Amino acid sequence: MSARRPRLVVIGNGMAGMRAVEELLQLAPMLYDISVFGAEPYGNYNRILLSLLLSGEKGVDEIMLNTPAWYASHGIALHAGDPVVAIDRRRKRVRSRKGVELAYDRLLIATGSQPIMLPVPGRELPGVIGFRGIDDVERMLDATRTHRRAAVIGGGLLGIEAANGLSRRGMQVTLIHRSDVLLEQQLNADAAALLGRSLKARGLELRLNADTVALYGNARVEGVALADGSRIDAELVVMAVGVRPDIALAKASGLHCERGIVVDDTLQTYDPSVYAVGECVQHRKATFGLVAPVWEQARVCAAHLARLGHRRYRASQTATKLKVTGVEVYSAGAFLGGAGTEDIVLRDPHRGIYKRLVLKDNRVIGAVLYGDVKDGGWYFELIQGATDITAFRSRVLFGKAYCNLADDRCTRAVA
Amino acid sequence: MSAIATTCPYCGVGCGVLARVDAAGGVNVAGDPRHPSNAGRLCVKGAALGETVDLRSRLLHPLLREPGAIPRRASWDEALDRVALGLRRIIDEHGPDAVAFYVSGQLLTEDYYVVNKLAKGYLGTANIDTNSRLCMSSAVAGHLRAFGEDLVPGCYDDLEQADLVVLVGSNTAWCHPIVFQRIAQAREARPALRLVVIDPRRTPTAESADLHLPIKPGTDVWLFNGLLAFLSRHGAMDAAFVGAHTNGCAEALAAAESDAGDPAAVARRCGVQLPDLLTFYQWFARHEKTVSLFSQGVNQSSSGTDKVNSIINCHLLTGRIGRPGMGPFSITGQPNAMGGREVGGLANTLAAHMDLANPAHRNIVQSFWQSPRIAERPGLKAVALFEAIERGTVKAVWIMATNPVVSLPDADRAKRALARCELVVSSDILALTDTNAFAHVLLPALGWGEKDGTVTNSERRISRQRAFLPVPGEARADWRIVCEVARRMGYAQGFNFADAHEVFDEHVRLTAFRNHDASADGPAAARRALDLGGLAGLDRAGYDALGPVQWPIGTDREGTARLFADARYAHADGRARFIATIARAPAHAPDREYPLILNTGRVRDQWHSMTRTGKSPRLAGHTPEPFIDMHPRDALLCGVHEGELARVRSRWGALVARVRHGGGILAGNVFVPIHWNDQFASDARVGSVVNPVVDPISGEPEFKHTPVRVEPFAVRWYGFALSRQPLAAAELTYWTSIQGEQFLRYEVAGHPRLDDRSGWARAWLGATDAEADWLEYEDRSAGVYRAAHVVENRIESCVFVSSRPELPARTWLSGLFVQERLEEADRVGLLVGEPSGPGADSGPMVCSCFGVGRHTICDAIRKQGFEHPAQITASLRAGGNCGSCVPELRQLIAEVRAAAGI
């Protein structure tokens, strides 16, 4: 029996925390004695795929990332369904709801985020839920069996995916959005209009520029009241108006928090033995809702936990895509353009295709793709690499394949 | 149907063509192996004849245009009455010389004969000239001066039997391709056969020469006077021949010595290297069997006739004429320029090679015709004729089968002239041409394949053009139209021909009529080499079966390959004449204001004003657009750039075309093709730029030498459109239309800013319907806009616009118009103008985050033997972001490995 290994306690069995653990196991398999606490009663699953679970395109087992067996095989003690309720940083101990107490040498907080529930009357009514975990999906699925009408508040990625899923499950869904541009964090008006058209074609009811003022109902929610006085009857209301970092536990333990748990470029909190990754953290001024930066955080954090302190986390451009099967949307960088920028646009409405690149000094700084997103990844590389596209500007919007044809085949007018 | 043997309607080579109409009504043509001129060969223009005989834009019934009104359909009776009464009234009021005919080397000999007879024998005016005036009248005049008659001594075989062929001012490879092929094949068989090309341009013909002398434009007479002097100095003179069969040698030599005695001076004057000049002179001196073949580069000059004689002089001095493999050889531009000359279709000749100025000749012709009168003084030659029309002294003109508003020099004057002419009649096969726009009476004529008659090519070979297509609409043969008008004017007896054969027979008999030396007491007579007497009395069947034959034609009906074998010439004394030619520079010299010299000519695959060749997609490919070929140095000095538009301006007019550096142009010169006109381009009629200077003897214009300047033509955008339907282009700053396979191509450019490009394009291409399948691409700040209109999955039209002249190649896009439906891949490439390249189709999307397709992934699994999604992620990034495709990756691995049996 070798000397006692240092103990790593992970709070949060979500994607960020477990990705960090996986990265750590890659770098230093035997370094820590690892325990993981998770609020949800399962192994670790891919939260991004909840939409597809809801829509029925994937089953629970398909979205599982690590089964309990995996934890066992790596000697990880998993406390599923038993969230940590207190951290005693002076004594370096955590206590779970079921009363399990563990000491740690290193603590990794990955508590993620909580859906924002609009502060409107009736939000506590049964049938009003957020969209965060498998349990939320299960509640929605119950509703699809017993009720007909649903309203989803929030026309962002999650809201649209929820609305689509519910309507695929046979519900009559109204999507309520505050601005007139769906997915305004990702799309410009042109692309959003195409998206709206295709969602309507899928049977969704759209209410844009619509402010929710109240939810009504008695035993259960019965509908949504809008600022314009109209009422939308619904026995299920899904709030998808955004998330906020889940920092209650960290705050209670006295860790410095602002909007999120404040970490440095090594993902270390103000307490040198405590790290944090994922949607619960705040790096510089930024908080996180997309997976790509979280993966990067996990990589960096794992490197430091593994005592190979050579990586630094740098906030990077992000790219997003909507997970609504049959609707291809891709967006990256400064896709809205603005002063000093140029743009290249391709429209093919009959194929439902819209592409827009925003350029500055002959470099791509933003991209919006609708209908044909296969070059999204490549544009993302061009954005990150600040590649000068002068040589292939005339064909860049037609995709990588055309630009690989090295020779610019443009010819003189007399051809 | 079985093949009909006929003759090509293009250049003066006069190739035999076998035409066959297939079941679908399509016309297939092939070279006629039995025709001696081409022995089965055809050039690309001839081979494409089948694409030019459709009835698109044909004139199918008479039209009348009242002043200020649009043309209206009329019956033949009304139209013919209008012509007859109009001519009659004007003749009664102003005399016969107030009317004129302007005809064409495109007419058949029979048509030519009848109209010439009407003008000179019945109306009593010699105001009948032809576009052949613009083409080889200098050769005619040169022949008359040297030989006493318009005679081409040799034949094409001589080119193959020669040891030295000198091509002077002739881009034979492009303008007379089959003759050039015969020379080329002879050189392959006999490399000793030397080829010298004398041309200011380095043409494709020059490229293949053993020696190219790029002389300064218009210096030919210095060159050949220098040669004459050199030949006499170096003992190449055939004193016996000169002494026995020629006059004027001493004077000619004196003249040559005086201004071209010193080869070094000649080399400087002509702008060629002295060693090259001497090589040419020595080769010429050394080779007994020398043919000097000359064409428009010699003829189209203010000293064209002297150029011709300076060449002939050298052959007379060396006695190299009338024997196989040698002689001066004028090759004509048009299929029946020779035929027209034979019947006298020129303002200064009478008929059957007889002379207006000669009372005996007038007597012969008039008594043969039994005509009320006979024109007594030469009429107006082409350029002078249109001057007279503009002045108002000629008040009626009947134009046949030609397009003077395009082809005359100072062509804008032709417009002004026709605009103020009291009566403009045009017999044509097309409804709308630059010239027909001015016609008061439009008469539908038969075109090639419909009309029936004879033509004579450059080697005096008479061939039949035969009909193999039905008469379209109400069209009629030109000779018949003329006869109808003649009858209405009261000349029934001279013009009641039943068919072309009867016209031909009369022409044949006239050539033989009193064709012998005059006797003191007998009626007027004159010996002419042009004697078709052997064909006299040929019946209809014989005429229809007539095979190609070279005149003179003796009683044995055998033709004659060469003239002057007996060294007997047509001058009264039987001797040939040397002409003392004093070299002189072209009429207008370049100056500070117009520093460049404009040269004009044909391109390989177009013919004249494109009324026929313009219909052929195949022919459009070679040179789709009018161009200005110039030296890069001059382009720099003029501030114009290759591929961009420029304006060529002279004191007479201007045109706009695209700058090109063909590489064959001397600094100080520019070349513009003659073909384009208002039907095919916004402003590309080179005729409007060319100076109206003519040769004092032949009256042939100086097309090859006009001082011009070239200036930038500013546009804000360039573009092109392809469309199944014709597009309205008149509003555009610049346009050219090009016939494609099932589409029309428009090369365009504009000066007005295009703000709403999308709106503009939709309107232009007629896709204004909001639901139209319209795909578009715009890079606003780069001024790039591209759009395509798709109808029922077929491409209907597309347009590409850019602030730069660089645009995608048209080739692939053009191909889409023959496709029944647009493939998905093609649609993707549509706005690039290119097919999606290999690897473009990555297959259905698997990883949307990184855009990795099924094909790409399966490929990687197969090639790199991946077993885990992680490996794919490591290599292709697929599955590395949201991970939603990882299950699918697993699935693909299983499938591929199963398929590969791993």
Image (tube, rainbow, N blue to C red):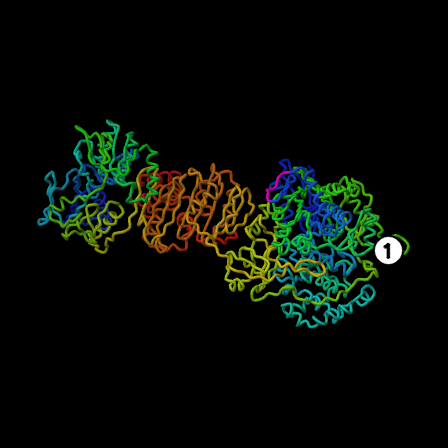
The crowding category of the residue bearing disc 1, from other C-alpha atoms within 10 Å (few below 14, some 14 to 19, many at least 20), is few
* Residue lying furthest front: B93
How many numbered marks appear?
1
Instruction: Read off the chain for label 1.
Output: B
Percent coordinates x, y for residue A68 in the rendering: 21, 39
| Residue B72 belongs to magenta span | yes
Percent coordinates x, y for residue B799 in the rendering: 47, 46
Q: Is residue B888 left or right of residue B235?
A: left
Image quadrant assignment for residue B880: top left
* Residue lying furthest top: A146
Residue sitting nearer the eye, A123 or B177: A123
Say which residue label 1 marks.
Answer: B517
Is residue A147 in sight in this rendering?
yes
Image quadrant assignment for residue A208: top left
| A72, above or below B678, in the image | above
Q: Is residue A25 left or right of residue A103?
A: right
Q: Main secondary structure of the magenta part?
A: loop
| Residue B30 belongs to magenta span | no
Residue sitting nearer the eye, B188 or B474: B474
Q: Secondary structure at mark 1?
A: loop
Is residue A46 in sight in this rendering?
no
Say which residue appears at 48% left-offset and 56% top-offset: B714
Percent coordinates x, y for residue B281 in the rendering: 70, 67
Q: Is residue B148 left or right of residue B707?
A: right
Give, as a three-letter code, the residue at label 1.
Asp
| A168, above or below A394, in the image | above
Which residues make up the magenta segment? Answer: B68-73
* Residue lying furthest right: B521
Percent coordinates x, y for residue B860 in the rendering: 38, 45
